[in-house]
Image (spheres, helix red, strand yellow):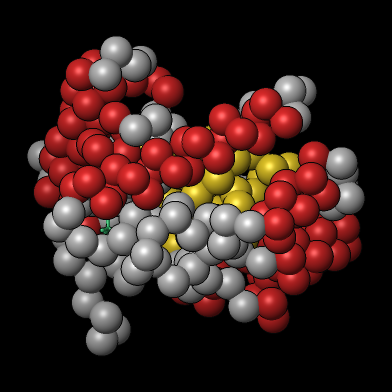
Amino acid sequence: MGVIKENLKCVNDKISLACKNCSRNADEVTLVAVSKFHPVQAMVEAIQAGQIIFGENRVQEAKEKYEYLTSLNLKFELHIIGSLQRNKVKDAVRISTCIQSVDRKELLCEIEKQCAKINKKIDILIEVHTGEESKSGFPLDDSLDEEVKNCVNNVYPHISLKGFMTMAPNTDDVELIKKSFSTLKDLQKKYRSMYTACDFKVLSMGMSGDYETAIEQGSTMVRVGTAIFGHRDYTS
Ligand SMILES: *Cc1c(COP(=O)(O)O)cnc(C)c1O
């Protein structure tokens, strides 16, 4: 068995076990394989091992991979998970099925505009700033309430808000990490009670170092890179 296939099996097994340990069904958690900085061949190997959803940070890199994988007729989906510049939104919405890192109103407006042009409705997650050290995401304030309301009220008809995403602070302090994840879960509860017709089902939280903790805290989507593909070479 190839290394990537083996790693994928290992991560999927750990997801199942983490679910079992907190009496959840393994099918409640979706694995996003974060392939940023890894060659497209690594994605081909993962697809052949059954992986479908991939997370990418940089739109140019994602676009090249998208075109190659599409030319091979492979079945896959891309999620954009990194901070997104406005001028990259046009390509981002064309190649992805979900933009997880929506961290400001300007992006919502641009995603709406670009999706309207190509008549596509796209899934998004609103990225929320839940930990002291994390830099990105909506702060927990009125601006977040306002944009959730706008999404619910169909102010952006080409956008479907599926839930929320966060990055835990980069620390060894498990309690701080848990607190960041439970903050996102609490936010979901709050908006569910405000908008009872919406379930904001997706909570995208947990990476290689903390996905089991995230599952225990209610994650429904984990974004795992290093544990599947190995360390990233940022010089490439
Ligand atoms: C890179 C990245 C990941 C994956 O991190 P690993 O520690 O390699 O699993 C997950 N989420 C986001 C937003 C990332 O940028």
Q: Is residue 187 left or right of residue 31?
A: right
User: Which image quarter holds the N terminus?
Assistant: top left
Left of 90 or right of it: where is 12?
left
> Within the image, what quadrant is residue 9 found in?
top left
Residue at coordinates 87% horizontally, 58% vertically from top-left?
116
Q: Nearer the viewer, residue 234 or 106?
A: 106
Name the foreground residue: 234 vs 166. Answer: 166
Instruction: Using residue 17 as the reference point, say whether residue 46 is left or right of it.
Output: right
Q: Is the C terminus in the top left, top right, bottom left or bottom right quadrant?
A: bottom left
Q: Is residue 107 visible?
A: yes
How far from the left and from the top, in percent, is residue 75? Answer: 50, 41
Residue 91 to residue 2: above or below = below
Q: Residue at x 81, y 59 (%)?
A: 112
* Residue at horizontal 67 percent and vertical 26 percent from the top: 193
Tell whether 54 sits left or right of 142: left
Q: Residue furthest bottom?
A: 235
Q: Position of residue 30 (x, y in %)?
A: 41, 34
Question: Where is residue 58 drawn, in percent x and y?
Answer: 48, 73
Seen from the viewer's position, the closer of residues 30 and 210 is 210
Write the residue at 60% across / 52% down. 126
Q: Quadrant of ligand 1?
A: bottom left
| Residue at the outermost front position | 141
* Residue 198 visible somewhere in the drawing: no
